[in-house]
Amino acid sequence: MTPLFNPQVETIISVIAGALITTAQFVLIRDTWTGKIKPSVLSWLGWGLMIGIGCIAQFIETGWEQSLTGLAVSTIGCFAIAFIALLRKNYAIERVDYVYLSLGIVCLIIYTSSRDPWITTILAIISDFIVGVPMLIAAWKLPASQKSHGWIIGGISWTCTLLICLGHPVLYAIFPIYLFAYNWTMVVLGNRK
């Protein structure tokens, strides 16, 4: 496969995507700090784990690719959002969230025992989605509790990341495609009346 962009252009796009996802994380941290949104703390902790392990697995398999920038930055941001939510005592936890976290951890255990990058990436996405279900439910039930410009900025970042993936092995596009879809779903759900 021939990448769509030369390495210099990929680097520029990756820096833009990294800056956007960093901005999105700061917006979500601010919105958590001020009480504008009430995050599911278990979702954010789980996401930090899932995205981080997915990023590490892809890095170990084929080395650093510019498309991993967003995943690395997202890992740090997810842990920061969870920490701020706990620090400010501004978070949501439902009993069922523990079930989702447990299911996510089961997928994570299976995922970490696999040496196949396809299996690990697919299981990382499944784990990440399971852990994120509480956020989707919250956005469905009470849209204002999850409405943040951070989701829009994140969606734009993942759009940039997908541009970098063009012409690279499909493996590198799978996680960004999922994160693109999740972010834009949160935008749609959070902006419903």
Image (tube, rainbow, N blue to C red):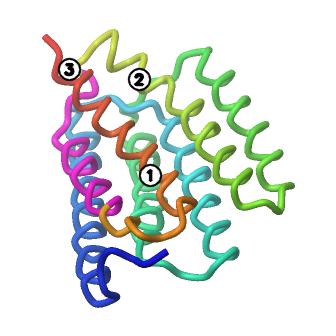
Residue nearest the viewer, comparing 34 with 142: 142
Residue at the extreme bottom: 8
Q: What residue would you read off at disc 3?
A: 144
- Image coords of residue 132 (percent x, y): 50, 32
Q: What residue would you read off at disc 2?
A: 136
First reached walking from the N terminus: tag 1 or tag 3: 1
Residue nearest the viewer, comparing 83 with 189: 189
Amino acid at pointer 1: Cys
Amino acid at pointer 2: Leu
Does residue 149 sit above or below 134 in this rendering? below
Dominant secondary structure of the magenta stretch? helix
Residue nearest the viewer, comparing 133 with 160: 160
Label 2 vs label 3: CA separation?
A: 12 Å
Amino acid at pointer 3: Ala
User: Circle 3 — which element?
Assistant: helix
Residue range in magenta is 145-162
- Does residue 150 belong to the magenta stretch? yes
Q: Nearer the viewer, mark 2 or mark 1?
A: 2
The answer to whether mark 1 and mark 3 are in CB contact below 8 A is no
Q: Quadrant of the C terminus?
A: top left
- Image coords of residue 142 (percent x, y): 28, 13
User: Circle 2 — which element?
Assistant: helix
The quarter holding residue 5 reads bottom left
Going 32% across and 74% down the picture, which residue do you hit?
A: 4
Does residue 132 sit above or below 66 in this rendering? above
Going 43% across and 53% down the picture, which residue do you hit?
A: 176
Q: What residue would you read off at disc 1?
A: 78
